[in-house]
Amino acid sequence: MRTQQTLGEVLASRGVSRRGFMKFCASTASLMALPPAMIPRIAAALENAKRPSVIWLPFQECTGCTESITRSHAPTLEGLIFDTISLDYQHTIMAAAGARAEEARHEAMKANFGEYILAVDGSIPMKDKAFSCIAGESNYDIFIEAVKGAKAIVAIGTCAAFGGIPMAKPNPTGAASVQDVLNEAGLQKPIINISGCPPIPTAITGVLAQYLTFGELPELDHLGRPKAFFGQNIHDRCYRRPFYERGEFAESFDDEGAKKGWCLYKLGCKGPVTYNACATIKWNNGAGFPIEGGHGCLGCAEPGFWDWGGFYRPLSQGDWGDWKTLGIAAAAGAALGIASVAVSRVKQARARQEKS
Ligand code: SF4
Ligand code: SF4
Ligand code: F3S
C-alpha cells in the first residue's frame, strides 16, 4: 500500500519520461471525450494525485470481467495497478492467497476507511447467502462490511450492475445486483455501473482514471452508467448502418447478404437498444467488436439481456413482457419503432428492385 505517494512521484521513480506522461494524459483526455485543451489540467491533477486504494471484490462471477481488464490497453493493466491506483485486494490476480490475502483486505480497509474505491464484479446471492463464500464468509457479509468504508462503488460487469447471467430465469441463487443489495440493506453509496458481459476494459480503466483526475464521479445515465461510454447505442455508431438504411439484411449467417456484410437486424442484433461503446472504442486494442466478427450484438450491457426472448430473434419478435426497468421499457418502444422502420426499409428496397 503506497497510497501516500503522488502519481507524479511514482512515475518519476519508475523513470517515466515527461513525454510518456503527457501521452498518458492525452489518452486519458480522449477516453473522457475531453478537448485537447484539457490535457495540461489533467497532467497537473494527476501529478499531484494520491493513488486511491481500490479494493476489488469478485463475487458470483465467471472471471470474464477480470479477464477483460487484463486486456486493457489505455492505460495498461500494469500501468493501472502500479502507477494509477493502489489495487490492494483482488483475489484472482493478487500474489497473496488464503489468510494473507484476507489480512491484506482488512488492512487496506482500515488504513483507507472512508476513502477507498470498492470495485465489485459478479452478483450477490440472496436466496441463501451461503451459496457463494470466500474464506468462509458469505459474499453478502463481505460486501456489507466493505461498503461501510467505501467512498464510492464501481459495479464492474452486467452481473454486478444488473444481476446478469446469475439472475437469469429461474435465478436459483436469488442473485441480486450491487444496487439491489444496497437497497435491501438500507445503505446508500454512490455507484457507477460499468455494464457489459464483460465490460469494455477501457471503460473500466477510463472511469478510474477520470476519478483520479477530477476526484469526482463521471456524469451517469439513468441506469447509473458513465455517459462517456454508454451515451450512445451500438446501432447509431455501427458501420453496417448504411445497409440497414438501404433495407439490406442478412437472412442467415452464411447467405450472400452475410458475406457482403449487410445488417444483422433480422439475425437478432440488439444494437438498436444497447448502449455501449463497442462500435467506437472496440475490443482487443481496437481490433474489432462482435458485429465486425459477423455476429449481432446480444445486448450484453443492458439489464435482463439473457431473458430478452432469444439472441437470434429480431427485436420486433422479442418478449418484452419481462423488461422491468423504465430504461428498458423505453428501449423496447424504440426497438418496436426501429422494427417498423426496418420493415418499411425492406419494402422500399423491394419496390426499388421491382421498378428496375
Ligand atoms: Fe462473467 Fe459477464 Fe458476469 Fe462479467 S458480467 S462476471 S463476464 S458473466
Ligand atoms: Fe449494426 Fe445491428 Fe444496427 Fe444492423 S441492427 S446497423 S448490425 S447495430
Ligand atoms: Fe456486448 Fe453488444 Fe458490445 S453484445 S460486447 S454490447 S456489441
Image (spheres, rainbow, N blue to C red):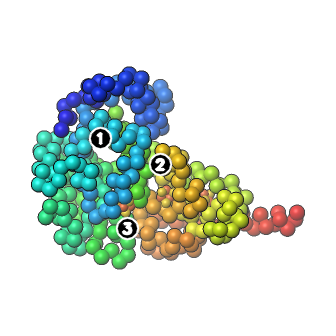
Please say whether residue 48 is visible from this viewpoint.
no
Please report the residue visible at 26 percent of the width from the left and 57 percent of the height from the top.
58
User: Where's the C terminus, which quadrant?
Assistant: bottom right
Task: Measure the alpha-carbon separation of dots 3 and 1.
Answer: 28 Å
- Would you say the beta carbon of the disc 3 residue lies within 8 angstroms of ligand 1? yes
Q: How many marks?
A: 3
The circle on residue 81 is 1
Characterize the local packing of mark 1: few (<14), some (14-19) or many (20 or more) Cα atoms within 10 angstroms: some
Check whether the beta carbons of the residues at disc 3 and disc 1 lie within 8 A of each other. no
Seen from the viewer's position, the closer of residues 246 and 341 is 246
Helix, strand or loop at mark 3: helix
Q: Single out the mark in the foreground, 3 or 1.
A: 1
Circle 3 crowding by C-alpha within 10 Å: few under 14, some 14–19, many from 20: many
- Whether residue 304 sits left or right of residue 88 in the image: it is right
Query: Foreground: 303 or 291?
Result: 291
Disc number at residue 165? Answer: 3
Q: Quadrant of ligand 1?
A: bottom left
| Figure check: 201 above or below 262 | above
In the image, is residue 31 above or below residue 288?
above
Q: Nearer the viewer, mark 2 or mark 3?
A: 2
Q: CA distance from mark 2 to mark 3?
A: 23 Å
Q: Residue furthest top?
A: 18
Residue in the image at 75% along x and 67% along y: 347
Quadrant that contains the N terminus: top left
| Identity, as a three-letter code, of the amino acid under mark 3 | Ile
Residue 96 visible within the image? yes
